[in-house]
Image (cartoon, coloured by chain):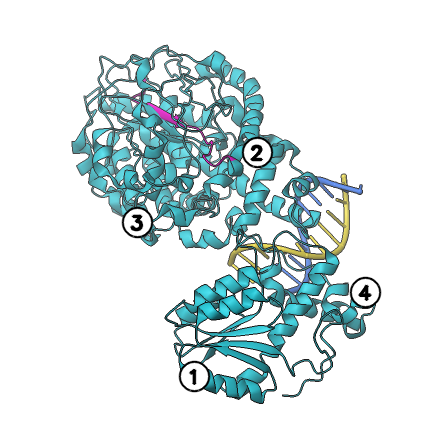
Chain colours: A cyan, B blue, C yellow
Amino acid sequence: MTVEERPVNAGNDEPKDRFPVGMRVLAVDDDPTCLRLLDTLLRRCQYHVTTTSQAITALKMLRENKNRFDLVISDVHMPDMDGFKLLELVGLEMDLPVIMLSANSDTKVVMKGIAHGAVDYLLKPVRIEELKNIWQHVLRRRKFDSKDQNNSNHPEKPQGSGESGQGNLAGGNADKNAKQNRKRKDQDEDEDEDCEDNGLENEDPDTATQKKPRVVWSVELHRKFVAAVNQLGIDKAVPKRILDLMNVERLTRENVASHLQKYRLYLKRISCVASQQANMVAALGGKDPSYLQMASLDGFGDFHALNGSGQLPNAALTSLPPAGMLGRLNTPAGLGIRGLAPSGMIQLGRAQNSSNPINDLGKLRPVVLSGNRNGNLLQGMPTSLELDQLQQSKCISRIGEFSGRNEQTVFPVAGGFSETAVTIGSSNNSFLTVANNPLMLQGHPQLTQSRGLRNPSSVNIAPRNPEPFDIGGGVSSHVSDQNRCNDNWQSAVPLTGFPSNSIPLGTPFNHADLGHSNLTDTISQMGSHIGNNPLDICSTSIVPAPLQDSRSDMQCQANILIGNNVQHDSSKFSNFGGLGNNLDQSLNGPKQRWEDHRQDYSTNSNLLFSSINSSLPTHGVVSQLTQRLGQNTVVSNQNVDTSLLSQSNSGAYLLQHNMDTPIRLKEEYSLEQTQAQNGFISNSCGSLEDLMAAMIKQEQQEAKLMDGGDIGYEVYPLRTFPNGIYSALLSFLAMYPVLFPTIEHWHENPFKPSEIR
DNA sequence: TCCTCAATAT
DNA sequence: GATATTGAGG
C-alpha cells in the first residue's frame, strides 16, 4: 500500500518524507520460522526490521533505547515471557504501539491482547497485506501524542500509566476518539481537512476544531470524582470545585458537570430505593418472622446465585453517597420529598462498644468477598453504588408490579436509610448490625443512650468498611464462613452465598424481656439492612414479637451493628468524613423534629437509630452506636432460632430473579392488590413516618384478629398475610435478586446512569 | 461565570 | 439503550 501521507510530524527524529518506509519495527517470536517469515514480510513493506526470538531480549532492547523502535510485533506465546506481559510492559514503559501475533484466534485471547493495549491482533500466518497497514498504528500514536503534548499533559497517560490502567481520560481511547472526533467534525463543520486554525499543529484535523473527546469515566476517574465530592461535601460539590480537586488534565468542567448530574441522579435513586426498602422492611418486620425468614433466606440465596461471577466491584463502596448528599437530595428541592425531611427521621446518637465481635472490620468485610475468589481483584473497582443502583431500579419496578402502583415514586427521607444495613437478630449477643452508609451515620455523642437496652454492651457499632475489597487478606474467608454466621449473629452474611440454612434469621422474642421494641426500630433496621450495600449486608433476621403483650406494640428484637463507612484506604475515602459532617448538620435539626413527631405515630414505638460518627477512626475502631429509645427498646439476647432458618419455603420463589416469580406467587396466594388501608405499599413513596403509622395501624388490626396467640416463631402462610404486608413482602423479596447484578459490569462503569434514571 | 436540567449525539 | 456532550435557562 502506498503511503502518500504527509510527514508524520516535524518534530520527530525520523525521516518523514516517506514515513512508512523505514519504520522501525521490532519483531518478536520464539518460533524461528515464523520470525523469519515475519522479518521477510516486514522488509518487503520496506520497514526497518529488528528481530529477536526472546521477549526478554526484546524488552531489553526497547528499554535500552526507547526511541529506537516505532512499533513492536510480538508473538503471544513465548517461553520466556508471555506476549501479554511484554505488551503490558511496553505499554507502560515506552508507549509504543504493539501488535500481537498469534495463531490463536480465540476471541478471548484476542480480547485479552486488545485489553492489554495491543493496537492490533494479527493471526498467523500473517499476510503481507496486513503488515502493509501497520504503519497506521504508529501514525495514530504519534498524532495522539503530539496532540497530547500540545494541549497539555494529562496526568493520565493514554497507554502508559501503570497506576491507573483504567483511569485514562482519553488516552486509551485515542484512536477511538480520533475517529469520533472526525465524525463529529465532519458533521458539523466541514473544513476539517484544512483546518489550519490550529496553526502549526494542524496536522491533525481532529485536534483543532473538534468537539471534545468523549470522556470515559473509568473507575479511577470516578473514584477521584467521588473523592472530590465527598471532600467538598455534597452541598458544595459543584463542577468547578470538583474539577479543581480532581486535578485531572483535560477533564473539563462540563465533563464534571455531566458526571455530577448523573451522580446526583444516582444518589437520588439510591435514596429512593432505600425508602422502599425501609418500607418493605417495616411491613415485613411488623408482622411475622416468617416474612423475614423468607426474605432473608431467599434473598441470600439469590445473592449467592448472582454472585456466581464472584466479582464484586470493590470500589463500589467507595462511591457511597455521602450523607450530605442524601440530605440534600432529600430536601424537597432536590427530591421533591414528601413528608418529613429525611434527616428528620434519623435519630442520632452513639454508644461505643468495642467488645462486640462485630467490631472486627475484617468480619464484616469478608462478607462481601466471601463468595469471591479474590478480594484484591476487586480493588479499584467502582463503588457499590452501582449495585445499589441496579437494585433500585429493578426494585422499584418490581414494586410497581406487585402493588400496581406507580413505580416512579421518589421516596423522601427514607433515603437516609437506604445505605444502612441492619442486622437484627441475635444469639447471645443481641445487636443491631447496621451496615451503614455514610449517609445516615453521624455520631452524636450527646445523643448516645443505652436506655431501654437491657444489655447495652451488646450494642455495638463496628465501623464498617465501605470498601470491603480494599481489605487485604483474611477478608474473604470471613464471609464464607457460615458457621460464624450461625454462631454469632454479628457475623455478616456473605452476600455471595447466603446459604439459606446457614443464615440466622432472627431471634425469638422473649416477651418478658421485650419492653416495647418498636416498630420503628424494626423498620429502620430492616430498611437499613436492605438499603445497605449488598456487600455489607449481614444476615438479618427480625422476629417480631407476637402481639400478645400489646397489640399495638410491635415487638422485635434488634441488634444493631453499625459500621461506619470509613474506609481503610483513607486515600480513597477520606472524603467521607466530610460527608459525615454534612450529614450531621443536616440531621441535627430534623432529628429533633423526628422526636417531636415520633409519638404521634405510636405511643409505644421507639426509635432506634444508630449512627456512625464519621470522625471516628475507621480502622478497627468500634463505631459508636447511637440509640434512641422512645420507651423500651429491648435488645434481648435470645437464642437464635435456627429452625426459622430452615423455613424458607415458598419464600424462595420470591427471590427468584425472574420477574415471573413474583407474579406467580401473587397468583398462587391470591394476593390482592395492595390495599390502601394497609398503606405500606399503597404509596411506596410515603415517608417513613407514614409507613410506620400505617404499620402500627395494621398491626393493631391484625392483633385483634389474631387474638394474641403466641406466634413469635410461627411461620404464617403467606396467604394469611394481610394484603399490604404481603405485597410489601413481595416487594422486599423482589429486591434481593437485584442486589447483585452483574458485578463485572461495574468494573467498567463506576456507576450506571441508566440505573439512576 | 457557573450551575443545573434537558435535549441531543454517539 | 446507555452514556457523554451540548445547549438553554436561571
Residue A288: image quadrant is top left
Q: Where is residue A355 in the image (x, y as percent from the top left)?
A: 32, 19
Camera-side mark, 1 or 3: 1
**Image: A2 above or below C4:** below
Sequence order check: which comes first, mark 1 or mark 4?
Answer: 1
**Image: A411 above or below A709:** below
Sequence order check: which comes first, mark 2 or mark 1?
Answer: 1
Sequence order check: which comes first, mark 1 or mark 3?
Answer: 1
What residue is drawn where x is 61% and y is 35%? A334
Give the letter of the chain under mark 2.
A
Which amino acid, mark 2? Answer: Met
| Residue stretch rendered in magenta on the structure | A552-570
Tell me the CA gap for discs 1 and 4: 45 Å
Residue where numbered disc 3 is placed? A656
Q: Do the residues labelled 1 and 3 touch (CB within 8 Å)?
A: no
Q: Is mark 3 on a helix, strand or loop?
A: loop
Residue where numbered disc 1 is placed? A34
Q: How many numbered circles are shown?
A: 4
Q: Is residue A714 left or right of residue A539?
A: left
Q: Position of residue A307 (x, y in %)?
A: 33, 50
Which amino acid, mark 1? Answer: Cys
Camera-side mark, 2 or 3: 2
Residue where numbered disc 2 is placed? A325
The stretch drawn in magenta includes residue A554 = yes
What residue is drawn where x is 47% and y is 87%? A37
Give the letter of the chain under mark 3.
A
Q: Are marks 1 and 4 on the same chain?
A: yes
Camera-side mark, 2 or 1: 1
Q: Are marks 2 and 3 on the same chain?
A: yes
